Amino acid sequence: MEGQKSVDDKTMLAAEYHSNSDIRLKKLPIPEIGRNEILVKMSACGICGTDVMEWYRKKKGPRVLGHEMSGIVVQTGANVSSIEVGDNVFVSHHVPCFECYYCNNEKFSACETLHKGNFDPGGFAEYIRVPSENVEFGTFKLPENMSFEEASMIEPMACALAGQNLIKPKNNETTLVIGSGISGLTHIQLLSNLGSNTIATDISEYRLKQASYFGSDHVFQADNLNETILRSINNGRLADNVIICAGNESAFQDAFKYVDKKGKILFFAIPSSDLPIPFENLWRNEISIFFSYGAGTNDISETLDLYTKQKFNFKDMITHALPLSRIAQGFKLVQDAKESIKVVVVPDES
Ligand SMILES: [Zn+2]
Ligand SMILES: [Zn+2]
C-alpha cells in the first residue's frame, strides 16, 4: 500500500507556520501512536480563515497548523476497536471531556480539555497522530458520497451551525450576513435551508455572486446598503438578526446600525482590536449580542447528518486544491480573498 510505504520511511513532509509569508516545509518523523491512538494519512486539509489571522496565530507559533482535516486511517493502536485501518475519516482537533461542569451543562466549547487538546502535529502534514480522546469523541467516518475535499467543509459548517444555534433565526425573520466569504456562505446555506429572508453584503463582486448562488435572497455591495434600502425590502423594519462574518471595523458599525429593535447580533468574526460599543442604543432597543468561537462534537454530528440529507452544497465551495508543498500559495489565496472560497491542501503525488 502506498501509505504503508511512506510509514516505513519514518519521515514525512509537514508545513511549519511562522507567519503568513513564512511557511517552512520540513521533514518530520512520522508520529508514533499509542495503544489508544490512530495514525491518519492526510487526504485533504482546509486552510481556515483563522489560519491566516496573523495577529492571532503568530504569537502561538511556530507550529504545524491545519484543523479541517480528513484522511485514511493507516494504523490503529491495540485498544482501538471503533475505527479500522482503511476507514475514511474526519477528525475534530478539539474535543470536550464530557465530564466537567461545562460539558455536563452542554457548554462544550467552554471545556478546558477542548481548548488544550489537538492532533499531532497538525493537519498540514502527511501523517497525523490522533490522541485517544479525539479517537473516542472526535473521529467521524465520512458519509458514503463525501469526498475528502468536501470533508474540509465539515468543521466550518459545524461552527456556523453552533453560531446559529445560539441566535436561532426563524423562517419569518430577516437575517443580514455581513461578509460573504467562506463563513458568510456557510451561514447563508443554513439560512436558506431554514427559509429565512437573507441579505448578504460584501465588498467583492465575486463573493456577492457566490452569496446569491448559495441562497441569499438579496445581495449588496457593503457601501450600497443603507437603512432606507433595508427597510424598503423588509416591510419597513431593520434586520432581526445580524451575523458578522468580516473582521473590518465598518462591519461592526454596520451591525449596530442595521439591527432591529429586540434584534440579535452574532459575532462570528471579531475585529483585531477593541472597539467602542454603543451601549445606549443597545440598551434602549434591547439588542442581544452573541459570540461563537467554535463547534462541539454535537455540531459536527448534526452537520454530517444534514449533509447526508443533502442540505448542503460543499462541492461548489471548494475552489482550490493545492499540494502540501505549495501550501504557501494556498495561504496567499486565502489571505488575498479574491476569487477563492475554500482552499484545500492535499498530499503531493508520490
Ligand atoms: Zn476552521
Ligand atoms: Zn469538559
Image (cartoon, rainbow, N blue to C red):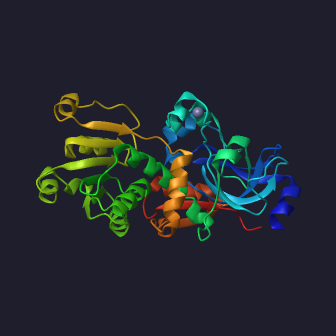
Seen as rendered, the residue at the extreme front is 104
Q: Image quarter for residue 233?
A: bottom left
Whether residue 154 is visible, yes or no, is yes
Q: Image quarter for residue 83?
A: bottom right
Give the side of residue 94 with respect to residue 31, left or right: left
Q: Is residue 212 above or below residue 282?
A: below
- The percent position of residue 123, horizontal first and vertical second, equals 66, 51
Q: Quadrant of the N terminus?
A: bottom right
| Point 51% across, 57% down: residue | 303
Seen as rendered, the residue at the extreme right is 8
- The percent position of residue 9, horizontal first and vertical second, equals 87, 56
Whether residue 248 is visible, yes or no, is no
Q: Quadrant of the C terminus?
A: bottom right
Give the side of residue 342 with respect to residue 201, left or right: right
| Point 83% across, 52% down: residue | 11
Return the residue nearer the eye: 102 or 91: 102
Q: Is residue 318 above or below residue 30?
A: below
Return the residue nearer the eye: 211 or 164: 164
| Point 61% across, 48% down: residue | 92
Return the residue nearer the eye: 244 or 253: 244
Return the residue nearer the eye: 11 or 20: 11
